[in-house]
Image: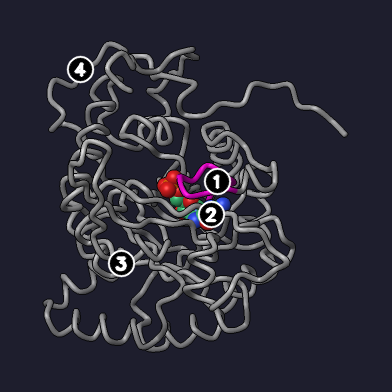
Amino acid sequence: MKIDFSQQLDFNNVLIRPQRTTISSRSEVSLERTFHFKNSDTSWTGVPIIASNMDTTGTFEVSEVLDKFKMLTCLNKFYNLKDYKQFLFEKQSNLDSKSYSEYVSNIIISIGIGKEDLLKLDNILTLFPEIKWICIDVANGYMKKMVTICKSIRKKYPNKIIIAGNVATGEMTQELIINGGADIVKVGIGPGSACLTRMKTGVGIPQLSAIIDCADAAHGCGGFIIGDGGITCPGDMAKAFGGGADFVMCGGVFSGHDENPGELIMEKDKNNNEKKYKLFYGMSSELAMKKHYGKMANYRASEGRVIKVPYKGILEVTILDYLGGLRSTCAYINAYKIKHLPKCCTFILVSQQLNTHFVK
Ligand code: 5GP
């Protein structure tokens, strides 16, 4: 047994130090970034924020909203070929070819590492070769099989942008890029709002430190990272980018809107006021397991929560709030582009992040 005594940070342990800036309006800030991915020799330009591939957020309906802001949606693993066919054929017939190809460049197919996942991927890409992105997603990206599968998908699809995860340390980030051939590594073990991994397993790394460590490792070998999970407010997203995340993925933030699936739940609070909620749940929760696999296997514990999220209205409002917050962070630290955030960012350790005087 060993103990690492170095300080490990979460978003709420730090604030970003303001500094002299020549930016006089948030409108001068650009949140778009162009990436060139070394392993796939492919480029993408957009706002590097991604809706998580949970079945409540990684949906076609959510992708239509995010696409308007040039953001990405990682579609959930439970869409089958028929779902892709139905949605994309209709999209193709409703949009001109430029808008269709822009839309398609902002969706990501996600798969696990089972045989049926690989077959599904092949089928989707045979029919829709214009889709650029593949996300190979497992809860524990440290498995040897992950690297093997990633490598074989890279061989088969040399020009697709491959995301692999999840991990939370630099050495495994490099392993997935160098030996797996991934372009981007998804980082986050246990920070998610619907996640119970840390409670059920004791495993995890505070998310800001995981991002800093993995970003450094990825950038050292020509790769990129996604900070996945743990974003609770626009400030957290700014901190994730400031810590070196090239992309940020959110689940909870994008849940609870009109565009998310599921009925509105009406409940009375203790003052008898009617409150509206929508259901959001971890993909390893008992609810998700039962929904998609019919049962919860008894060799595994549920590592996901089921949450009633207060209803938030339309998704666009949340997106504008986050993009506005990010632009403002950039203005406070003289970062004209989102890409400049890490080099303009100094984190200070704090013992209190927010004034909670009026918060119960
Ligand atoms: P959030 O943005 O809600 O904080 O985190 C979203 C991320 O949580 C997802 O992208 C995914 O990586 C992770 N996640 C989703 N469902 C589960 C789950 O059931 N268990 C765990 N451990 N993580 C989950």
Q: Are marks 4 and 1 in contact (CB under 8 Å)?
A: no
* Location of residue 341 with respect to 23 vertically, above or below: below
- Left or right: residue 298 versus residue 208 is right
- Marks 2 and 3 sit apart, C-alpha to C-alpha, by 30 Å
Question: CB at mark 2 closer than 8 A to ligand 1?
Answer: yes
Along the line of sight, which residue is nearer the eye, 70 or 141?
141
Q: Is residue 226 magenta?
A: no
The residue identified by callout 3 is 105
Residue type (three-letter) at the residue carrying disc 4: Thr
| Residue 326, horizontal then vertical, whole percent | 27, 33
- Marks 2 and 1 sit apart, C-alpha to C-alpha, by 14 Å
* Location of residue 227 with respect to 159 vertically, above or below: above
Residue at x-position 25% and y-position 30%? 336
Residue at x-position 70% and y-position 55%? 142
Along the line of sight, which residue is nearer the eye, 90 or 38?
90
The residue identified by callout 4 is 22
The residue identified by callout 2 is 304
Residue type (three-letter) at the residue carrying disc 2: Gly
For marks 4 and 2, the one nearer the N-term is: 4
Assign the magenta stretch its main secondary structure. Answer: loop
For marks 4 and 1, the one nearer the N-term is: 4
Residues in magenta?
Answer: 185-196
Mark in front: 2 vs 3: 2
Residue type (three-letter) at the residue carrying disc 1: Gly
Q: Secondary structure at mark 2?
A: loop
The residue identified by callout 1 is 188
- Left or right: residue 256 versus residue 185 is left
Tell me the quarter of the image containing the C terminus. Answer: top left
Mark in front: 4 vs 1: 1
Mark in front: 1 vs 3: 1
Q: Secondary structure at mark 3?
A: loop
